[in-house]
Amino acid sequence: MSTSPTRDIAVGETARPGGIRWAVPSVVMVAVLVAVWQIYVSTSGIRPQVLPSPMRVVRQGWAHRDEIGTHAAATVQVTLIGFAVSLTLAWVLAIVVDFSPWLRRAFVPLFVASQTLPIVAIAPLMIIWFGFGLLPKILVVSLVTFFPMAIGLIEGFAAADREAGALLRSMGASRIQVFRYVRLPSAVPRFFTALRIGITYAVVGAVFAEYVGASAGLGIYMSLQKNSFRTDLVLAAVLVTALLSIALYLATFVIERLVAPWALAESRSGRA
């Protein structure tokens, strides 16, 4: 799953919600697409096994809500644990790299190389090596999400105001103090942008890992329903996956407002 950090971070920076008006175009577009889908299914006579109507997807999803909810809880667990592991590693390695130019030259190419590994091939190997438990799915999620967060932090540290850092050093500040008061705050906005990118990748990574092999989760649920030709339930699970991704994405703004409200205000004033 390869990605360009510069492009992804730019997308993240332009995707900040700014009230209800921010969501109106997306809601209208989704409503139009759903209406076209419903009309096509109703007028074409296509079989539900091939393409169910949106109403059927919602109706059947609600009828099987307990089963879908159980699998969704398993997916959320894998997503959050895997993302927490990835987040911890990204912070530790980004800080280590920032303190050592030599390690930056050594690690950053490895970070980039990690994104050239096809998840389609790696996920089955994780199942073979570590079985069908929680560990292989956590590793897949961590591998998918580590890169954007690590690069976002590294670039954020590097973007610190050099003059401010030089001023503190001239006043006798240690390197750790410069990092704490200059480099760390400068990395916060980029970190939260990377966090939003990473959390959406995390859900996709978890579902894909479950699809390859798991005892519970939306991925294995989709696989089982696909084999039973229940396209409506497959799409219901896809809808739940999308809603989970959106909920986690929006949660990052709440966290940012609590942890670093100045970064959110600064970003909005920069766009004004």
Image (cartoon, rainbow, N blue to C red):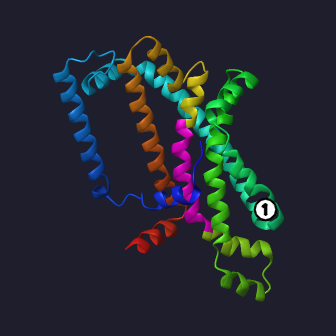
- Total labels: the figure holds 1
Q: Compared to 193, does 131 lie above or below?
A: above
Query: Quarter of the image holding residue 174?
Result: bottom right
Image quadrant holding the N terminus, namely top right
Residue 93: x percent and y percent?
75, 55
The foreground one among 161 and 32 is 32
Residue 71: x percent and y percent?
50, 23
Which residue occupies 62% across, 42% down?
144
Q: Is residue 93 visible?
A: no
Residue lying farthest to the left in this orientation: 43
Which region shows up in magenta?
187-204
Which residue occupies 56% across, 21% down?
216
- Residue 124 among magenta residues: no
Judging by the rendered image, the residue that carries numbered circle 1 is 105
Query: Quarter of the image holding residue 98?
Result: bottom right
Could you tell me which secondary element the residue under label 1 belongs to?
Answer: helix
Q: Is residue 69 left or right of residue 150?
A: left
Which residue occupies 58% across, 56% down?
5
Is the stretch drawn in magenta largely helix, strand or loop? helix
Q: Compared to 205, does 235 lie above or below?
A: above
Which residue occupies 60% across, 23% down?
212
The foreground one among 36 and 60 is 36
Residue 175: x percent and y percent?
79, 75
Residue lying farthest to the top in this orientation: 228
Q: Is residue 13 visible?
A: yes
Q: Is residue 177 left or right of residue 155?
A: right
Query: Quarter of the image holding residue 117?
Result: top right
Q: Amino acid at mark 1?
A: Arg
Image quadrant holding the C terminus, namely bottom left
Residue 231: x percent and y percent?
37, 19
